[in-house]
């Protein structure tokens, strides 16, 4: 089974969470390469750009970096102009961790849920706080079609798991 089949096995709106450095962004970039056209929206600044040099992105993958909820909402709406098959937001709870504004996060998630119902696949990565909790977890679990946890070697969710490996050429799995 390939990664995209595993990740989207249970629905179009998938949340992925895990500790920093386990590969959430790498997995998201790999899925963007597999499912084109795709839009990758970063709330983490341009940190992902260093990874782009290692993989061949090519045409059909569009990138945007946002710094606020308003910019994020605009980026989501503008992404629809590319007729994407996949929208990725890395990470969806970045602003919530600092502002603790549940209403702003909820509005974004409702828009994304609506988009996923029109057969556009959506990946949301979620940061984990220092106490090993996901800020916004109740909304994540309520609105996602599937929730997957990433460890250094596995993607785990709903009584299934996929072993993966990050290489210089991208992410391979399910091994």
Image (cartoon, grey):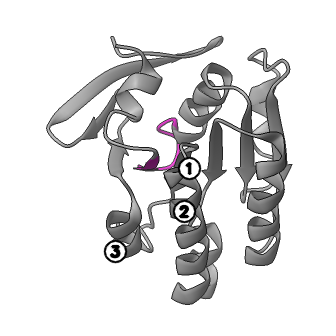
Q: Residue, x 58% and y 28% (percent of image)?
A: 31
Q: CA distance from mark 3 to mark 2?
A: 18 Å
- Which mark is first along the chain, 2 or 3? 2
Q: Residue, x 83% and y 18% (percent of image)?
A: 58
Residue 118 is marked as: 1
Q: Secondary structure at mark 1?
A: loop
Callouts 1 and 2 close, C-beta under 8 Å: yes
Q: CA distance from mark 3 to mark 1?
A: 24 Å
16 falls in the magenta region: yes
- Give how far across and how far down residue 154 sits, in percent: 32, 29
Is residue 60 or residue 168 the one in the foreground?
60
Residue 138 is marked as: 3
Callouts 3 and 2 close, C-beta under 8 Å: no
Q: Secondary structure at mark 3?
A: helix
Is residue 121 or residue 64 the one in the foreground?
121
Note whether residue 132 is visible.
no
Q: Residue, x 41% and y 15% (percent of image)?
A: 2
8 falls in the magenta region: no
């Amino acid at each position: 089974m390939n990664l995209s089949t595993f990740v989207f096995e249970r629905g179009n709106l998938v949340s992925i969470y895990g500790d920093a450095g386990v590969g959430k962004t790498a997995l998201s970039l790999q899925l963007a390469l597999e499912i084109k056209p795709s839009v990758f929206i970063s709330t983490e600044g341009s940190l992902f750009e260093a990874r782009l040099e290692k993989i061949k992105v090519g045409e059909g993958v569009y990138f945007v970096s946002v710094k606020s909820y308003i910019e994020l909402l605009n980026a989501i709406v503008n992404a629809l102009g590319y007729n994407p098959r996949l929208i990725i937001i890395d990470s969806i709870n970045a602003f919530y961790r600092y502002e603790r504004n549940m209403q702003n996060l909820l509005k974004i998630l409702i828009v994304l849920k609506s988009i996923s119902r029109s057969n556009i696949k959506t990946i949301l990565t979620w940061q984990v706080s220092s106490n090993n909790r996901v800020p916004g977890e109740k909304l994540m679990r309520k609105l996602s079609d599937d929730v997957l946890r990433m460890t250094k070697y596995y993607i785990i969710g709903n009584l299934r798991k996929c072993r993966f490996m990050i290489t210089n050429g991208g992410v391979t799995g399910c091994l």
